[in-house]
Amino acid sequence: KAGVTQTPRYLIKTRGQQVTLSCSPISGHRSVSWYQQTPGQGLQFLFEYFSETQRNKGNFPGRFSGRQFSNSRSEMNVSTLELGDSALYLCASSLGGTGAYEQYFGPGTRLTVT
Amino acid sequence: AQTVTQSQPEMSVQEAETVTLSCTYDTSESDYYLFWYKQPPSRQMILVIRQEAYKQQNATENRFSVNFQKAAKSFSLKISDSQLGDAAMYFCAYRRTYSGGSNYKLTFGKGTLLTVNP
């Protein structure tokens, strides 16, 4: 079974631009979560989607948004990019039901804002 | 809010030796899940081991085992017979149990960088 895929793997953007990152979960998984990883703040939860609905949201400004499609693929969008948005963005998929369902991570998208 | 603390920013171990990584957490919940994830230089986050808080028995996965002390809110990872491929950043993570939809957030510690010396 194919793992979680994220595209693109690397991205360089300029301050003020916007960016869209994509995540394809493991087949059959309905939950997709997004995390931001930086050296200073570590791993921080952005949001989680299940069956096209946002179920949980972390403490990030409204410039960070996301969505999930009917095939469970998810996108996250960051508008008006700031230098501090430079980070590794990780996507994780899970079955999404009750129970201790593990989250499986993708390889990440490395975003650099200049 | 739940917090996870890893007090050892870096650890090193000789190949074939045993090493223990520490993790403490703070929560008011009685039921939850704890995880150890490994992130090698490739940056791919890999699940190492999982522990359900309601289970008293410590989880074990091959050379990896945990020491779960619920009252002390401690969750350490022991790696036996360390191998060069074990070198990575290790993250301890906490997750609430299902409670109606807002439970899939993982709260991570800052990580412990493990070096394995040949």
Image (spheres, coloured by chain):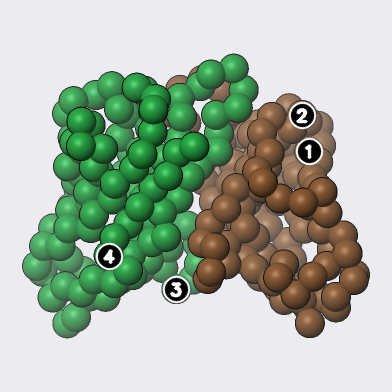
Chain colours: A brown, B green
List x then y, in percent, for residue A105.
54, 51
Q: Residue at x 39, y 25 (%)?
A: B29
Instruction: Count neighbours of disc 1 (C-alpha within 10 A) and say few if under 14, some if 14 to 19, many if 20 or more.
Output: many
Chain identity of mark 1: A
Q: Which mark is residue A16?
A: none
- Label 4 sits on a secondary structure element that is loop
- Label 3 sits on a secondary structure element that is loop
Q: Nearer the viewer, mark 1 or mark 2?
A: 2
Q: Which residue is mark 4?
A: B8
Q: Residue at x 15, y 62 (%)?
A: B19
Question: For the residues marked 1 and 4, what is the alpha-carbon distance in whole angstroms?
Answer: 37 Å
Q: Which residue is mark 3?
A: B41
Are dots 1 and 2 in contact, CB under 8 Å?
yes
Three-letter amino acid code at the position of disc 4: Gln
Question: For the residues marked 1 and 2, what is the alpha-carbon distance in whole angstroms?
Answer: 7 Å
Q: Nearer the viewer, mark 3 or mark 4?
A: 4
Q: Nearer the viewer, mark 2 or mark 4?
A: 4
Three-letter amino acid code at the position of disc 1: Gln
Quarter the C terminus of chain A occupies: bottom right
List x then y, in percent, for residue B94.
41, 40
Are dots 3 and 4 in contact, CB under 8 Å?
no
Q: Which residue is mark 1?
A: A68
- Label 1 sits on a secondary structure element that is strand
Q: Nearer the viewer, residue A24 or A57?
A: A57
Asked if badges 3 and 4 are on one and the same chain, I answer yes
Question: For the residues marked 2 and 4, what is the alpha-carbon distance in whole angstroms?
Answer: 38 Å
Q: Which residue is mark 2?
A: A53
Residue most extreme to the top = B100
